[in-house]
Image (tube, grey):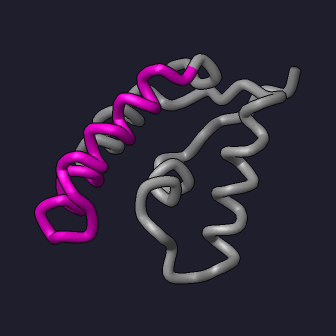
Amino acid sequence: MTIFVLDNAVTMRWLLAAEKRADQVYAESVLSSLAQAQALVPGLWHLEVCNVSIGAERRGDTTAGEVEAFLAHLEDSPSASTR
């Protein structure tokens, strides 16, 4: 099994669209790779995800319901573990 470090910037592209199409394509390919790989996340990753998600909701880039669903999906994902 492949193991890689998942950066928050990539993770947030799963909730918020990237300005550059190439960044979005890359993030989607990383998400697809989780079917065969395991992601390790830095200890601050959870805080970063929450902080960016809340900021996006406050700016109106997403809704509270979308943020809740996104966070629940990440929490239920067996493919990411903290190191």
Q: Quadrant of the C terminus?
A: top right
5 w.r.t. 66: above or below: above
Side of 17 relative to 53 (left or right): right
Q: Position of residue 32 (x, y in %)?
A: 74, 44
Side of 51 relative to 14 (left or right): left
* Quadrant of the image occupied by residue 77: top right
Q: Quadrant of the N terminus?
A: top right
48 w.r.t. 74: above or below: below
Question: Looking at this view, is 18 or 8 the one in front?
Answer: 18
Question: Looking at this view, is 26 or 44 the one in front?
Answer: 26
Question: Looking at this view, is 22 or 48 the one in front?
Answer: 22
Q: Position of residue 42 (x, y in %)?
A: 49, 31
Q: Position of residue 48 (x, y in %)?
A: 33, 43
Span highlighted in magenta in the image: 52-77
* Quadrant of the image occupied by residue 58: bottom left
Side of 51 relative to 32 (left or right): left
Q: Position of residue 45 (x, y in %)?
A: 41, 36
Number of numbered discs present? 0
Residue found 55% across the figure and 46% down from its top: 7
Residue found 59% across the figure and 17% down from its top: 78
